[in-house]
Amino acid sequence: MLIISDIEAAILGLICESPQYGYQLEKIVEERGMRNWTEIGFSSIYYVLKRLEKKNYIIGEMKAIEGKPARKVYTITSQGIDAMQFKVKSALSENQKSISSIDIGIANIPIISPEESLKSLKSYIESMNEKINFLEKSVKIHNDLKSPYFVVALFDRPLNQLKCEKEWINKFIKTIKEEQKIRD
């Protein structure tokens, strides 16, 4: 079966680029800011490597590294390449459902006062502004570094999503204020 999780695909994608060992993968995840768009924890890298190896998507071999102890280096198999190609095509072909906790808040907004709603949503916008600033800086850095277009896109896409969501939240705030006027 070719189905792999998003975390498996993130790790397997790095091994597609070149053979890697665990700590090297951690460094790449950090350098590329992959934790902004994946759920990869440091300890999960080794767990995922074991799963991928068990599925025969990668092969791990102990190799001597210049001046360092031998490390297990992982190489992708043809079955792993097939799984990655299937995952990439699937991910690029179909919009997946996105779940956000703000929807729980919106669904249950009558539980709190309109004033609390407005205060909470303004705080939400402040947290969005921090993320927007981070992503704008990241896009600039990667453009300045002449990073590949797909690396820039990993920061630019969420940046534009946040800007759009911020616009929607501001409209929703206006709706709350208008609804409150009607009830008064």
Image (cartoon, grey):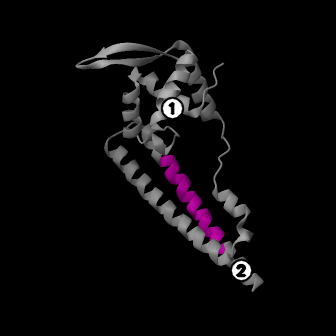
Kind of residue at disc 1: Ala
Image coordinates for residue 67, horizontal then vertical, percent? 22, 19
Q: Which amino acid is tagged 2? A: Gln
Looking at the rendered image, the quarter that the C terminus falls into is bottom right
Looking at the picture, does residue 89 appear above or below residue 74? below
Residue 103: in magenta span: no
Disc 1 marks which residue? 10
* Quarter of the view holding residue 5: top right
| Residue at image location 69% in from the left, 76% down from the top | 113
Q: Residues within 10 Å of mark 2 (few under 14, many from 20)?
A: few
Compared to 138, does 183 lie above or below? Answer: below
Residues 128 and 55: in front is 55
Q: Which residues are magenta?
A: 156-174
Q: Quadrant of the N terminus?
A: top right
Q: SS at mark 2?
A: helix
Residue 180 bears which disc, if any? 2
Q: In the image shown, does 87 or 114 lie closer to the viewer?
A: 114
In-image side of 150 versus 142 (left or right):
right
* Most distant residue in the right direction: 183
